[in-house]
Amino acid sequence: MWNALTLAVGNKYTTPIDWEGDVEKWETIREGFNPNDMQKDLSLQVVEAPAYLGDIKPEFDTDIMKCIETLMKQLAIYYKYHGIDILPPFRDLDKLNLGIVTDNQFQRALIRPTGLTDEMVSIIGSHYTVPDKPGFFNYLNFYNDIHARIKTLETDHTGRPPIPYGYWPPEIPKSSEILEVFDKLRRIVFLRGIRTSEFFKDYDKLRSGLITESQVSKEYCATKRGLYLTCGKEGILTEQDIQTLLKCFGTGDGKVRYRDFCDVMAHAYNVPHLEKYPTAEVCRPPRGTLFQLGENLTDKEEKRLAQVLKELSQQVEKRQLLVTPFFKDFDKKVTYRRLLTRSQFERGLDYLGLSVLPTDFNLLCRKFEDPTTGDVNYVAFSQAIDKEYTGFTADSFEPETPVEEQTPLKLEEQQLGFLPQRKTNDSTVNVDELLARMRHHVLVNRVRTVDFIEDFDTLHSGRIPIPIFRRTLNMIGFSPELNDAQFRALVQCYEDPKMPGHVIWTNFTKDIDSVFTIPELEKKPNVKVPPLETYQLPKVGTVDADILDPPERAQFKSLVCRLKERINHRHLETYPVFRDFDRYNNNHVFRAQFRRCLTMLNLPATEEEMALLEKVYCDELGFDFVRFLEEVDPHEKPEKIKPVKIGDHMKDFDKLNSGRISKSNFRRALDLDGFELQSSEMEILEKAYESCKMPDYIDYKLFIAEIESIFTLDHLEKFPRAEVTQYKPPPDWTLNTLTTEEITAYQQALARLAERVNTS
């Protein structure tokens, strides 16, 4: 009892208490302390009486108050970032524990950041002077003001909504204290992938999910060390936070349900046993919620910063700079942290040729500063000045206006974190266009949809449930292009009217597989099958130049002609320039890369002309430079000479393998081989290889051996010492025949050329 009372009173009341005269303090202590309740920790029942802080000197000068407010805010940010407790130095100098110190003691005890002068300290101290005691300052008021501002900084997340929990045990009530503790941990556990259960399993030998409080306290020391080593300063828990966790997950008999704690941390933004609930929607944090930047700037600083970023963005766009690779070269020493020191950030700006003033550079560092390490987030900076670069995405944090009242969730859904599915307008879905895209996918990838669906129809009834239908579509490869609205439109089109909740999959496969052939074509001999090219569609976002407006079409044609003439005149190699930027080998580049390629090739084009080219040649993958080069730099593709293996068709006419075929079959075989000889040429070959025994037949084997002698000699295994020479067709000029006069003129011309060469 006495120890509890002494702990409740603390060090602030060192003199004996007059219980009869100081009834108010006794009521305050008795209200929070219950000596009969021995199940609770006595330290958790402490109610501290407010300290006597005295009066604060009022300030009538508004300029001084603004100066004091600015200094206090900067001190709070500095103390919060470095984790400094400013109270112990003052208490060491306050021997009588009165809450006041002298002017010199205040100057000595105040922990000063860099740049805080004596004049600034005097201004702060003048606000906390004791009215009755000149030369004394009330440091407790100063400490409470700093502490209140630090609390405000921790809880002030303007524009950032609270992140919902994906899972919470239904038997554990939610309170503001426990949620505040979990907010410190779940973000770190989610980002770093910490497995909290590994810290507790060794103490639970029976795997009952319970351990004693002493084991929890010891293990939490290890947990704190592990979190600090893994997460740095973000994963530190105070003793009060640990006591709050023990109070929340305690069973009342000295044990703690650590498994519930680990489930909450392991499923911070997830649902346990998600494989049992395939249609559950997980409460994921909005994109950008876990992303943090530096401090908030004033309105004047924000305007100046916006102007600086606009100027830098204009320079980047004008010079077609790639900002991120210059900064990324500094971020390869340890890991890809997306952070740079201030000196590295300054060097990167210097390499890019982006010069800023020192004051503007400090604004950039403060805006894009990481709150934990103090380094500069160059990815966020690159995205701010480079319109074509996306380093991260963030959802809108503006509160949405309620459209309609949602039905309350079921108890199971509340426990598992399910969210009701939002309804979208299905009337905007074009089913014919959707089926055409599906046929294109099936045709290009040669997919038979029946093979993916028929295994789920065990009764061969021709219908399957809607969830199974959705799964088969994902297996075929229609996801993620197929969104929920399009899927519901498909279900409405193929839903079984006799059995709700099922889809007639046979009708769907007939419509999709019709891209290959028409069903029961043998019963319709007069039906004309359309060619496969009719089902092939261009990529999403492709625009045909023929559907442009007449002015745009004329401008496009003149631009293409001008680029083609310039490429032909300068003999430019255009394809290698674009190919170097095609990292994914899909014949596409980004828009910024396309403009950079035009600059490298010195092909001038205005901003309007570039936008017109992007409008015609851009699709969902980017800029299709292959189609563009086919227009401005066409190349004749050399005809591929296919090797012809003669003799196969001739052997088909020689059923007895006698080595002879008729002359008519010989001509027919040469036509099948694709020689396209004239009748006179055929007669020459027939006369040369005519059979001696049978004049109407041809010894085709002799003909084949003569033709194939260009590759090798026949029966070479019998002549191991024979020298085989590679066949080379004679040059075309050797086939020319000259008259006697032409030969004389030719020799005289060669002699004059030889004399000229010898004299030079």
Image (cartoon, rainbow, N blue to C red):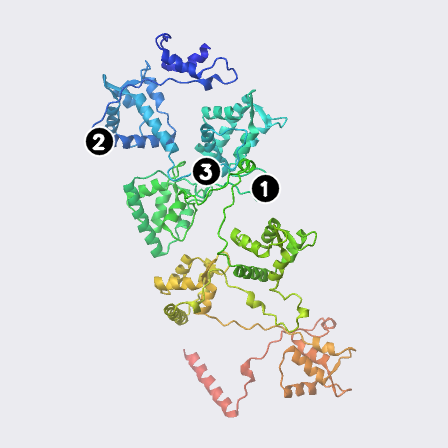
Mark-to-mark CA distance, 2 and 1: 62 Å
Cα–Cα gap, marks 1 and 3: 22 Å
**Amino acid type at image mark 3:** Ile
**Disc nearer the start of the sequence (2/3):** 2
- Residue 348 locus on image (x, y percent): 37, 47
In percent of width and height, residue 743 lies at 51, 89
**Which residue sits at x=22%, y=31%?**
62
Residue 367 occupies which quadrant of the picture? top left
Q: Which residue is drawn at 39% across and 13% down?
A: 27
In the displayed structure, does residue 368 sit left or right of residue 661?
Answer: left
In the displayed structure, 209 sits above or below 288; it is: above
Q: Mark 1 points at which residue?
A: 277
**Extreme left residue here?**
61
Q: Is residue 735 left or right of 697 when viewed as pictured?
A: left
Give 714 or 745, whichever is nearer the viewer.
714
Q: How many marks?
A: 3
Please, what is the three-letter code of the amino acid marked with disc 2?
A: Thr
Q: Give the mark nearest the N terminus, 1 or 3.
A: 3
The crowd level at tag 2 (other Cα within 10 Å; few <14, some 14-19, many 20+) is: few
> Tag on residue 163?
3
